[in-house]
């Protein structure tokens, strides 16, 4: 939920063939595990944004920076639909399709992985907008890892932000 407007956001994995997305957005390299982010406004209007290569599984949060809404979710999946390897801050872009692999676009801010010495994947974000905190959960095998970041530091300095605390 967008704290500023009350609009609700949902993410769904499109696990079947991405043929309809390939037709609608032919310039994007689609995988079979595309994601659709839907915004439902307080008045009932729906808009969507489409993501490719953001990995298997679906979890997201939304937050505002400088009056712009960002979807925060796992990114950097591979063609085979593997787990997200990073967290990305993606500006809400209704009607757009975005390839979430680093180097394929200039709009996503990628949170560094230097805290993740175990190389855990399956990145899932949660945001506490009131206290301006970002929690990143990740997993490698049966081991789970959690990192808490200052949300503003993670957004403003994504390549150098350090976690406040890490649990393994």
Image: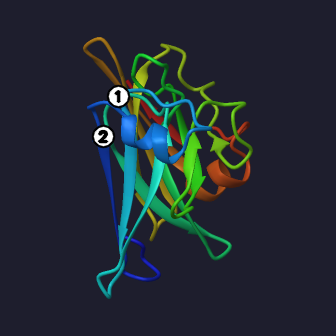
Disc 1 to disc 2, how far (Cα)?
8 Å
Q: Is residue 17 above or below residue 158?
A: above
Q: Position of residue 111 (x, y in %)?
A: 62, 38
Residue 25 in view in this figure: yes
User: Residue beneath label 1, please?
Assistant: 56
Residue at left 36%, top 79%? 41
Circle 1: is it few (<14), some (14-19), or many (20+) Cα within 10 Å? Answer: many
Q: Is residue 56 above or below residue 89?
A: above
Q: Quadrant of residue 110?
A: top right
Q: Is residue 134 above or below residue 120?
A: below
* Disc 1 element: loop
Q: Is residue 159 left or right of residue 89?
A: right
User: Residue beneath label 2, please?
Assistant: 13
* Disc 2 element: strand
Q: Position of residue 32 (x, y in %)?
A: 37, 27
Looking at the rendering, in which quadrant would you find the C terminus? Answer: top left
- Between 107 and 49, the one lying in front of the other is 49
């Amino acid at each position: 939920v967008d704290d500023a407007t009350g609009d609700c956001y949902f993410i769904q994995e499109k696990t079947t063939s991405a043929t309809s997305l390939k037709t609608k957005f032919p310039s994007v390299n689609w995988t079979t595990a595309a994601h659709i982010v839907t915004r439902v406004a307080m008045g009932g209007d729906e808009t969507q944004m489409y993501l490719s290569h953001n990995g298997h599984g679906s979890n997201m949060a939304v937050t505002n920076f400088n009056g712009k809404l960002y979807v925060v979710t796992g990114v950097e999946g591979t063609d085979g639909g593997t787990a997200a390897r990073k967290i990305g801050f993606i500006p809400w872009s209704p009607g757009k399709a975005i390839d979430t692999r680093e180097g394929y676009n200039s709009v996503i801010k990628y949170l560094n992985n230097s805290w993740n010495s175990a190389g855990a994947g399956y990145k899932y974000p949660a945001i506490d907008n009131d206290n301006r905190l970002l929690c990143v959960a990740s997993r490698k095998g049966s081991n789970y890892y959690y990192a808490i970041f200052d949300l503003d530091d993670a957004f403003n300095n994504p390549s150098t932000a350090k976690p406040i605390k890490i649990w393994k």
